[in-house]
Image (cartoon, helix red, strand yellow):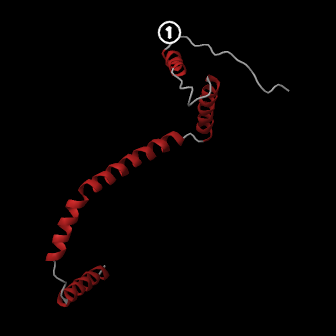
Amino acid sequence: MKSVYTTTLRLNLNDDDDRRAWEYLRRLDKKKHRSFSKAVVVAVNDYFGRLELLDTDPYLETREKEEAFLQEIRDTIRQSLQQSAPANLGAILQLMQGVQPIAAAGQEAGIETLDAAMDFVDSF
């Protein structure tokens, strides 16, 4: 049984996709990539593997786009919090120093208000 097969890759340099592929192959860094063959094998496997995934899961691409969008939102929020954290922390500490503990009378007033609200709801 033959374990190595040879094939020909024909690229039309008048076609944009073919020309772009040729440019990638021409600039291939031999220190990072052993050969054209390995690059083509990886590309073919990625391409057809993705097609198979999309055939079995037609919503895969939508979920990937949604996840990328959500990740971008998370990153933006994280970056904003990191940039503004010192300023916000100082303001929060100043506010906390000026806050007085809630008096017991205030707690009783809150309980009375809650009781009145529950009485109102029970009246229906």
Quadrant in the picture for the C terminus = bottom left
Side of 43 relative to 77 (left or right): right
The type of residue carrying mark 1 is Asn
Secondary structure of the residue carrying tag 1 is loop
Count every numbered label the image shows and give the total: 1
Q: Nearer the viewer, residue 62 or 23?
A: 23
Horizontal arrangement in the rendering, residue 8 relative to residue 62 (left or right): right
Q: Position of residue 89 (x, y in %)?
A: 22, 65
Left or right of residue 48: residue 26: left
Task: Tell me if 120 is positioned left or right of 65 in this view.
Answer: left
Visible residue check, residue 33: yes
Q: Position of residue 98 (x, y in %)?
A: 13, 76
What residue does disc 1 label? 14
Residue sitting at x 33%, y 54%: 78
Position of residue 113 relative to residue 35, above or below, is below
- Image height of 109 relative to 51, above or below: below
